[in-house]
Amino acid sequence: MKIARVSVEGKIKTVLIKGEGQYLPIDESVNFYEISDSSLRGQGPLLQSFRGSDFLIPLPKVTSIRDFYSFEEHVRKARARRGLNVAPEWYEVPAYYYSGTSMIFPSGSSVPYPAFTAELDYEMEVAVVIGKEGINIRNEDALSHVLGFTLANDWSARDLQRKEMNIGLGPSKSKDFATSLGPYITTTDELEEFKESDDRFDIPVETYVNGKRYSAGNIRDMHWSFSDLVEYASKGTRLRRGDVIMSGTISTGCILELGPEEYSWLKRGDVVSIRSPVLGELTNEVI
């Protein structure tokens, strides 16, 4: 299933995307995390086209955001720009940081350019949404706790990030001013055909800035799989419905990695579009 939340005549509705221009509204009595084929019996399809600006973030509430660092090529290239090698510890634990939940932007919305940076960057990512609570989740059970997958953009202020990383407690403010999530959640069961193994998926992702392709990668290149991320995040901590776990930047998926000498930092008026033939399109304009 593809689950979205939209604003229709001032009312928020949860819908299933059934096809091009075909949306099935979900009765408000059905819990968002318990939507199933059996709960949809008797509901008729709503045929309606939505503007991109009608889409909201695809879940009722984001309870937390953990953003991991799981693509080796990105880690290697990004650290090389700071004169560093990949830390040996990176291969031992799947590190992450927490991001704020108060500045989350849906696809089709505008993202304000923060006043404290001159080096605004995008980060092309995929995120999973936790749909079943758990603590100390085993790796082999991890995907059963995932409702589904969506696109994500971890906007970054690179000049401020360098300072925070030198202090040793970052990133923080350089990241928490904006996170974008895709227009819908694709449930895990719908991704079976894209599985390469028990926890690896062949899902390509690209990013375009003002119509020009900047980035192209695939989440099958993750060093740490989503099962690894869920297992690690749940060690000694209860994961809750609505927790968002982000992959970290997919290889080639930011200007920092590509090189600002060739691909300039983002500016007001730029339109950033992260696209996947599997997970849809996440588009925002910087204002």
Image: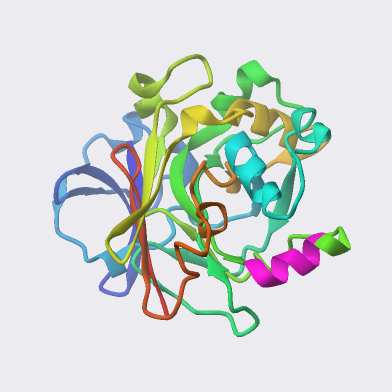
Q: Residue furthest bottom?
A: 115
| Residue visible at 21% across and 38% down in the picture | 42
Q: Quadrant of the N terminus?
A: top left
In the image, residue 112 above or below residue 213: below
Q: Provide the major secondary structure of the magenta segment.
A: helix
Q: Is 95 on the left-hand or right-hand side of 206?
A: right
**Residue 84 coordinates in the image, percent (x, y):** 77, 47
Q: Is residue 12 visible?
A: yes
**Span highlighted in magenta in the image:** 158-165
In the image, residue 136 above or below residue 237: above
**Residue 108 coordinates in the image, percent (x, y):** 33, 67
Residue 135 occupies quadrant: top right
Q: Is residue 43 magenta?
A: no
| Residue visible at 56% across and 31% down in the picture | 222
| Residue visible at 65% across and 82% down in the picture | 116
| Residue visible at 70% across and 20% down in the picture | 138
Q: Is 75 on the left-hand or right-hand side of 56?
A: right
**Residue 178 coordinates in the image, percent (x, y):** 56, 68
Q: Is residue 160 magenta?
A: yes
**Residue 103 coordinates in the image, percent (x, y):** 57, 70
Coloring applied to the structure: rainbow
Choose between 127 and 141: the one closer to the eye: 127
- The mark total stands at 0
In the image, residue 258 above or below residue 219: below
Choose between 200 and 233: the one closer to the eye: 200
Q: Is residue 184 visible?
A: no
Q: Quadrant of the C terminus?
A: bottom left
